[in-house]
Image (cartoon, coloured by chain):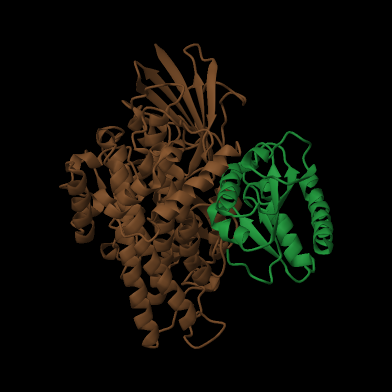
Chain colours: A green, B brown
Amino acid sequence: MPRNPNTAIRIIGIGNLLLGDEGVGVHVARHLLDHCHLPEGVDCLDGGTGSLVLLEPLQTADRIILVDATMDGAPPGTLRRLVPKFSSDFPPSLAAHDIGLRDLLDSFYLLGDLPPNVVLFTVSIAEMQNMVTTLSPEVAAAVPLVVAMIIEELGVASSA
Amino acid sequence: MSNRIVIDPVTRIEGHLRIEAVIENGVVKDAFSAGTMVRGIEKILKGRDPRDAWAFTERVCGVCTTVHALASVRSVENALGITVPKNAELVRNLMFCAQYVQDHVVHFYHLHALDWVDVVSMLKANPVEAAKIAQSISPWEKNTPGHFAAVQSRLKKYVESGQLGIFANGYWGHKAYKLPPEVNLLAVSHYLDALEWQKEIVKIHSIFGGKNPHPNYLVGGVPCSFNLEEVNAINTERLNHIGSLIKDAITFVEQVYIPDLLAIAGFYKDWASIGGGLQNYLAYGDLPTKGYGDVGSFLLPRGAILGRNLNEVHEVNGKNVEEIKEYISHSWYKYGAGDGVGLHPFAGETEFNYTGPKPPYEQLNVEGKYSWLKTPRWKEHPMEVGPLSRMLVAYAKGNTDVKELVGAVLKKLDVPITALFSTLGRTAARGVETQVVAHWMKNFYDELITNLKGGETRTFTRDKWEPASWPATAEGVGMTEAPRGALAHWVRIKDGIIDNYQLVVPSTWNASPRDAKGQRSAYEEALIGTPVANPEQPVEILRTIHSFDPCLACAVHIYDPKGEQVHQVQFY
């Protein structure tokens, strides 16, 4: 698989910006792009609702950090760090785009020769809201916390 | 005995889609289609700058993002009387074609093929025999015994890991699967090839649109800077890259997709008389060659066919308030003038009125309101939209490229033209369209290169860019064709901002509930008469629903006659 030698780690925020909290992954990606200095070899992508279009971005980095919303029943704003290996390892109800992400990751695993290196951060959200472009206070408060977790993850990864 | 089957899929474009089907004596007797998630992008857009609307609408859907941006910029241009420069039209057409070719191939291999291809059966295949079959239908370079053996062993490892993943929860071994193991191996091998290929063709979006997913659009043109010699512009090197992607796309479609489609279809010809459904077909058309205002110049023509009469194509006018109307008799909305009226999208209202059961629920009250989708009608007729509609309208209008290919496919399968009105016909029409569009894409590319070499590099007009030049009020419609069917955005601009914005998307035409007269929409009608051999494994229902490319993945819940759930299958 062709790799960009400069891209050791790629952060991809996933979600639908029009569905309020469901778009939290994109809000995190934008926060990282706008307010954080990413170390050399790390890039960040607003993955939107990009399903299979994101296959190549997954394949062209050594390590992937995904950020997505989940409806797992936990209080809104709850954060989790997961290392999913198969689609069955995913938390339930990854909001509006669960199938896309599962499909995508399974395709990624299926095509790869080595087990991919993927870390998934999830932010719990309540039930799907009507269409709005803003986050609820609980989920908005989680954004800087996820960002901090990702920055810490980058530190661990680069010293590993 | 009658069973109630519930198909509860999830789509990006409109959230959850659910189908309840009544099965009697092994055949679907009635069906109800319900979208169960709220829309309301209209509310987000109201009050915004109409030149920004595309960036929001593009986020509605992850699969056909570009078409929502295209419909949006067109609606605004149509309202303000802007005609984009020729190169902008060509770039938009190229992005449109790239979207089609990618989306149709992904639909065939990754969303639909597993309704016909038994993944587990391929483990028993003889790779040498599979290669012989493959080589007899196509010169594709990867049709070798070695490659097929490698694919088989990769899949074997995957299956043995206990994680079928992307192939999980299929109805493997179901007697409705009719392909020999070798053809299953061939199809799965090409499934993997298609995954790798699809990520290349969409680079056309990254190059012209600056990024992907969600490439950039622009009211008045395209945000592309052409300069053949300039490093930071779209230069000769990038254009050559696009040229080679188009060449590879034609090769993939002609050496992989079409041969596989024909080979697989040959085993399922009984599906040429199942799943026909509605007899009315609607296409807004697209691919203008002399401007969006000149409908006669569209390569994909606009028109409506009623009663499967291919001798007459009716004109369609998106601005005529008597033609397209949305009804809410069975939808969770309310209209100011009462729920019995139909409203043209210019006068469209989006006031929610949920009267359904509190989720989770087992059954919808299909006598009353049962869907979040409104019910669009064209001159009161329910219409099917999608590749079949587009190909029928093009065929009936005498498009020679389409007529020739449709004729060749019918001959190859040895079926009459009426075979098109079916589940198999819908799937075949998508293949025909892909091949035609791939070649048109090459023509658009050649024309763009000629223009650029001749010094014509303009991609944007500033005409009417400034709100000060706009009238106090203006109305426009942006009509296009998403891969899965007719799509339009209607915008009303007042004092420089959006006053009303309505979308009627393909799934609304196809997946909507009944209208006030009780007429079913496309999914509901197409399921009537579909055989279901085993209600525990209703692969036949999925075949017909997936033939529409509903942009979904679904969870199928099977209920016993008392309404108790007996079985549930996740489908990816």
Left or right position of B261 against B467: left
Of the 4 image quadrants, the one containing the N terminus of chain B is top left
Q: Residue at x 49, y 36 (%)?
A: B335
- From the viewer's side, name the closer residue of B110 and B124: B124
- From the viewer's side, name the closer residue of B460 and A33: A33
Is residue B62 at all visible to an observer of this figure?
yes
Residue B284, compared with residue B512, is above or below; it is below
Left or right position of B350 against B375: right
Q: Residue at x 59, y 55 (%)?
A: A113
Q: Position of residue B488 (x, y in %)?
A: 42, 53
Q: Residue at x 54, y 74 (%)?
A: B466
Q: Quadrant of residue A69?
A: top right
Residue A126, compared with residue B494, is above or below; it is above
- From the viewer's side, name the closer residue of B76 and B249: B249
Is residue B103 at all visible to an observer of this figure?
no
In the rendered picture of this protein, how many numbered marks are placed on residues?
0
Q: Position of residue B288 (x, y in %)?
A: 33, 65
Residue A107, compared with residue B140, is above or below; it is above
Q: Position of residue B322 (x, y in %)?
A: 33, 45
Q: Position of residue B281 (x, y in %)?
A: 29, 44
Q: Residue at x 33, y 37 (%)?
A: B382
